[in-house]
Image (cartoon, rainbow, N blue to C red):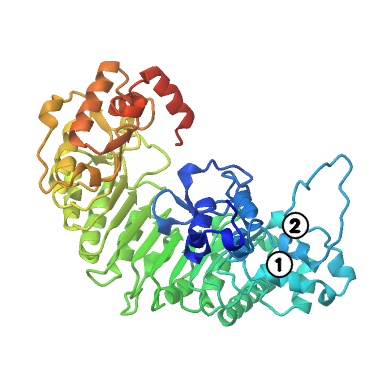
Amino acid sequence: MEVSGAHMHRCLKSPVIVLCILEALYPYKVDIADIQESTSSRVYRCGADGPGKTYHYLERDPTGGRGAVAALAQTCRFFLEPCLNTLWRHLFSLSPLLNCLDDTCVPLSKGEQGPRLRPGRLRNPRQFEINDPNKLNWNRFNYYAHRVKVNWTDDDDDIPKYVWFRLAASRRAPLLPRLQHLIWRETDRSKLPYLSLLCGPALQRLTVFPGDPQTESPDNDESTMVTLVLSLSLRSPLLEEVEIVLDMDGDYAAEELCEPASWMVAAMHPLRSFKCAACLDTLAFTWLSSMPALHSFGLVGGWVFRDLVASPVFFPKLEEFTVSEIFLGEMTRLLTTFLPRHSFTTISVSTSIYIPGGEIEPFVKALCLYCNPATLTHLRLDLTDEVLRDGIDRTLDSDTLIALQQFTQLREFSIKAYQIQWKDQFLKDIAPAWRSLQILKIDTVCIFRQPTGMPKSTMHSLIPLATFCPDLHSITLEICNWDDPDPVLMAIQRPNMKEHASLPMLHVCLGHNLNAPPKDLRAERRVAAVLKALFPNIRSAWNTGVEFWIRHDWPEYQDLTQEAYSISAERNRVW
């Protein structure tokens, strides 16, 4: 069938349908589980999209989607513009655009055949030093530049500093007028002021590494940061999300990031979201806390929380926060600075230092007092430390956490701790209150760290979840007792149960890895029967043997042996 002129089907002339086709070929977002990451791929994760999601910022084209869109652009003039918009919306280097400025032919190196190995490299940087930049082909540059929505710039671009200088001296910013998200990870801090060349009125998100301080005079650091931020406030009034990150090679310590990050925050206009891979000084954090529309923030370290003073304008609209590498006492102090029943929706806390069991109970009480039960939907707690210390009592009864049942709107509850003594009774008390729960993860880190004889969760703990939580699609528990009841007795009656077809697909993990028990064939089959009786919507499990017996009666698996299934599962499973 011809796809041009009068013979093209009229449905293909609909812009909406064309955009749907392009999204299917080359999606803006893609499930990270479907992509094998490699060192040649740049993947920028965004937690706002939930677990397992990522923005599709990939240099390589593993699905062939980009090539398919390029081929589609050549079939019909009607497809050209939307296809070009799709192909140019993510740039992993500014060099492809700068290469549009002239038709210089750079000879291949000796022994180099076919297309250049690094097509993203700047082809002829000397032209900016020799020629008048105003005489270059800026019409062709602008033809593609206005399509760019996301740009990633780092050391791999290898754009010399004199090129940035000539661009700044001869061109009026912004170079990318419709840029919405800029990711700047240049190590050379002296190039940082040129970041503003790329920013225009459409910029909404900025991810920036301030650069290595050794490449810039210390006396100029603060003025450079402040001048840059003030320039961004004028050029990009819609900028509302800022993330300050560390270098990609891990050569830059978080402590070194605190000072430049604080300088930048102190000069910023009010934001909606802010994340930083370090802590801030008191002045910068005070300004951050007074931003009237700040919706979420994330910090690493919490020493600034120790001397906080309550204020009527302390994060008035804050809904989400993520804090890591913090003492739990500091986290409790931060919560008590808010007004009671603050409307949090997401709280994520991660500690990498020893947490005495006595600090958990005050923290839980602060959660219950200062968080609104009607709004909190995601609670993620990592209360582990890096080193096992002998002779320290790490046991705390899980009854301490029963108070969390007041958060009846929770959709995700994740806790990683080995100080807590878990019992089946905890889920029996909690499940009736958490009827909207979708993700449950209780990780004991390592069962061998727990004292001998400590009560451990059994298969009975799954019964209240199956009874009261029909929306679950992920369960992670540490099951240590495999003396399971008869599967027939596990076929319980569920109040207000949804039809099986409308239930979400469920993944169950009852062990740390593929080698977790049970490893006996009869035990695997019995456990699978129990899980299927409890959860008709179960689709996958942590153990390939259990997973086979969950699926063995599905039409597509009826002719497959357990050994053959295990081989294919090992090959295809992504952990």
Residue 457, x across and y down, in percent:
21, 34
Q: Is residue 158 above or below residue 198?
A: above
Q: Residue at x 76, y 64 (%)?
A: 100
Residue 105, x across and y down, in percent:
87, 57
153 sits to left or right of 373: right
Q: Is residue 549 above or below residue 68?
A: above
Which image quadrant for residue 294?
A: bottom left
Graded by Cα atoms within 10 Å as few (under 14), some (14 to 19) or many (20 or more), the crowding at tag 1 reads some
In the image, 353 versus 179, the foreground residue is 179
Residue 117, x across and y down, in percent:
76, 46
483 sits to left or right of 353: left
In primary-sequence order, the first of circles 2 and 1 is 2
Q: Residue at x 49, y 52 (%)?
A: 24
Q: Is residue 337 above or below residue 247?
A: below
In the image, 151 versus 364, the foreground residue is 151
Residue ID for mark 2: 158
Residue 184 showing in the rendered view: no
Residue 54 showing in the rendered view: yes
The disc labelled 2 sits on which kind of residue? Asp
Q: Residue at x 29, y 65 (%)?
A: 344
Graded by Cα atoms within 10 Å as few (under 14), some (14 to 19) or many (20 or more), the crowding at tag 2 reads some
Residue ID for mark 1: 191
The disc labelled 1 sits on which kind of residue? Lys
Q: Secondary structure at mark 2?
A: loop
Q: Is residue 11 above or below residue 357?
A: below
Q: Are marks 2 and 1 in contact (CB under 8 Å)?
A: no
Quadrant assignment for the C terminus: top left
Task: Tell me how far mark 2 sits from mark 1, CA to CA.
Answer: 12 Å
Q: Residue at x 58, y 76 (%)?
A: 229
